[in-house]
Amino acid sequence: MLTLVGKDLPGIVAKISQALFDLSGNLGETSMTRLGGNFTIMLMVCVSEKKSAVQEKLQPVCDELELFSGINEFCFIGLWEA
């Protein structure tokens, strides 16, 4: 599961989705919540890349949008890695 938290800004979903698309990621269940001026998104994602490659791809987006990110359980095609 990929979790992102930060200030609610336009384009968060689009930019995160694009980064995961660039990794040929498959989005599963998703939960998005806006509380006050904050935004949280939780995504179940399946990708063929290693966890480090996913973090590397998402980091510039997280830095740009000032998002805190965390990867708990993550589905890699053929692998499960915490």
Image (cartoon, rainbow, N blue to C red):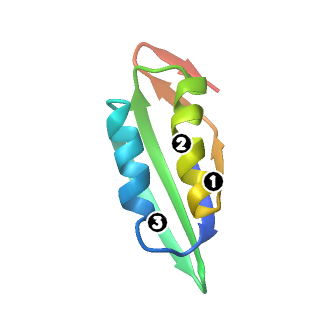
Q: Which residue is mark 2?
A: 58
Q: CA distance from mark 2 to mark 1?
A: 9 Å
Toward the viewer: 66 or 51? 66
- Label 1: which secondary element: helix
Q: Which residue is mark 3?
A: 32
Q: Amino acid at mark 2?
A: Leu
Q: Quadrant of residue 55?
A: top right
- Label 3: which secondary element: strand
Q: Which residue is mark 1?
A: 63
Toward the viewer: 8 or 26? 8
- Label 2: which secondary element: helix
Q: Position of residue 47 (x, y in %)?
A: 40, 27
Whether the residues at callouts 2 and 1 have beta carbons within 8 Å, the answer is: no
Toward the viewer: 79 or 47? 47
Which residue shows up at 35% across the image and 47% down it? 18
Badge 2 or badge 1: first in the primary sequence: 2
Can residue 58 be seen?
yes
Q: Amino acid at mark 1?
A: Asp
